[in-house]
Image: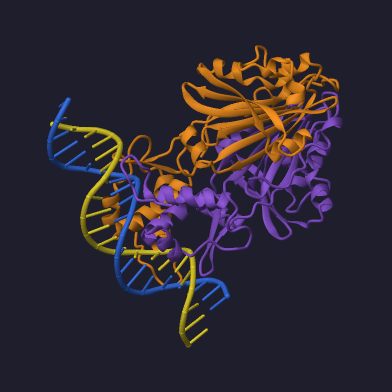
Chain colours: A purple, B orange, C blue, D yellow
Amino acid sequence: MNISRGAGQAPKYQRLAADLRRRIMDGEWQGGVPLPVEGELESQYGVARNTVRLAVDVLVNEGLLVRIQGKGTYLKDHSVVDHHVYRAPNGAAPGTPLGAATSVYVEEAQAAGRKLTSDFQMLIVRATTDITERLRLAPGEAVVLRRVLRYLDGEPWSVEESHYPVRLAAATALMDPDPVPGGDEAALAEAGHVETACVDELCARMPNPEEARWFQAGPGVPLLVQLRTGVAQAGPVRVTETRYCADRNRLVYSLGGLESTASVGRVPAQR
Amino acid sequence: MNISRGAGQAPKYQRLAADLRRRIMDGEWQGGVPLPVEGELESQYGVARNTVRLAVDVLVNEGLLVRIQGKGTYLKDHSVVDHHVYRAPNGAAPGTPLGAATSVYVEEAQAAGRKLTSDFQMLIVRATTDITERLRLAPGEAVVLRRVLRYLDGEPWSVEESHYPVRLAAATALMDPDPVPGGDEAALAEAGHVETACVDELCARMPNPEEARWFQAGPGVPLLVQLRTGVAQAGPVRVTETRYCADRNRLVYSLGGLESTASVGRVPAQR
DNA sequence: GGTGATTTGTGCGTATGTATT
DNA sequence: TAATACATACGCACAAATCAC
């Protein structure tokens, strides 16, 4: 390929990136085989090392490649784990608790033969506006923050932060510095707040450095963020923000009549 | 700040990036004011231009900054549009069509005083495995692809690609090279395939160059991808993949009893 | 409408550090 | 230990876009 830059052409490093992308898609360098080293690419294309690095930067930030110092540059693998975050209760009457429908992931992980572990922290913090607005609290009001760090086969998987108004959590098991057996929603229900509905807001963004470190996510890997507001008869009772590393996870909602959706979408990877 | 590199320290450009991140979070350079120009940062921190650019690259790839050639480097603004992709029918009986529950976004956009426009294309293509597996077709089988490019106030907003088995679409309005009045699901229903359930698979990834160009998305902006498999009594009838630019959009699912969730989560921006 | 100053974008060269093999 | 390969850092020159005049 000739990548000398003519008039009206894209910059060299972008054309180099495009050519490498094509070669990647064509299936060169499958699996564990590294790409040609930087010096090799310099001479293959007749450009400076800087230009090679700019081109590879592009593909790294697209999430296609990973660079490992001292080893080489490799394709990134894409093994994706499905995470069922909601299964519609089949024709459930209004007022039905949601709990049973939302904690499927544990069985799923174990059924797939994967080890699910977690760390737990309980904190009292001043809530951000994200939280106060959804819980209808005053700005900066204190909330109970229950954080679960989950690992799948020892690898960081998700961060789940549940926020409860102190008023609701007081005198319940939610004040304990340990996970509630049966789940937090059981403790809420015991206090008379049965979660019968929720609103999920989903967004994606790049991780900040701290998140990137925890998830062991290099550049080019976005986070998938689920912000769930749990609602009981009297109003919102908790806000749970769960963050996933998007290159390893996918969220699944099964909506409407359940019986017909059981076998849909069991596909491992993409791209 | 002193960013000379000592032993065991992080690299200069990373420490520079961290310092700039701090200054950004502290609220320097609010709104339309540009950051100091590269030359200014060079002298402020006593580093080479290359190092400044590496540091700014980090923040650009985090989605914090945008660079505009000839102008300067600016904070990226975060005005987010909510997109209601699902509202649970309130205690609906099994077998209820989903259509009415899923096309809320049109009214929502108009209620917000925004102009919603779209382009439409109808193609016959060989399906990818993503599609064939979900529609239970043979690999590479042909499908009807109906593509809607949506714009909000003239800005690119979403790409929606609906895939139908040719067998189902034949002799319906889905073969027309125009949008179906009343929506595609009406045409399906007319042919006896009433969509009563669906499975949504959500993921996030970086755009490829073509997608980035269309969405006018710079580096650091992931896509949010919704893959919806629509299911009728007899099985899956269509797969719709919708891609959103994650820095401008958020997907919202209202689940469980509707009445109590109406006012939840009406928050404009984050971060 | 054009010109020049400013600012980011591209591209080259070189040297040295650090992780892996 | 030595060789290899990516990471960091400096310097320079010119291109392209924007804006003020």
Q: Position of residue A232 (x, y in %)?
A: 76, 30
Q: Position of residue B263 (x, y in %)?
A: 65, 23
Left or right of B119? Residue A165 is right
Q: Nearer the viewer, residue B48 or B162?
A: B162
**For residue C14, side relative to residue B78 (left or right):** left
Can residue A177 be seen here? yes
Give the camera-side residue of A99 and A54. A54
Q: Position of residue B192 (x, y in %)?
A: 81, 17
Quarter of the view holding residue B160: top right
In the rendered view, would you say A212 is above or below B207? below
Q: Is residue B56 left or right of residue A199?
A: left
Instruction: Kindly identify the residue that appears in the image at 77 percent across and 16 percent down.
Output: B189
Q: Quadrant of the C terminus of chain A?
A: top right
Horizontal and vertical percent position of residue B3: 36, 62
List the single residue furthest toward the top: B181
Question: Which residue, as the protein is rendered here, is positioned at the far front?
Answer: A1
As drawn, is B238 to the left or to the right of D20?
right
Report if residue B10 is visible in the image.
no
- The residue at the point 75 percent across, 51 percent down is A176
Residue placed most toward the observer, A110 or B142: B142
The image quarter in which residue A88 lies:
top right
Q: How many marks?
A: 0
The residue at the point 43 percent across, 58 percent down is B14
Q: Is residue A112 shown above or below B152?
A: below
Identify which residue is drawn at 36% across, 43% down: B28
Q: Nearer the viewer, residue B5 or A40?
A: A40
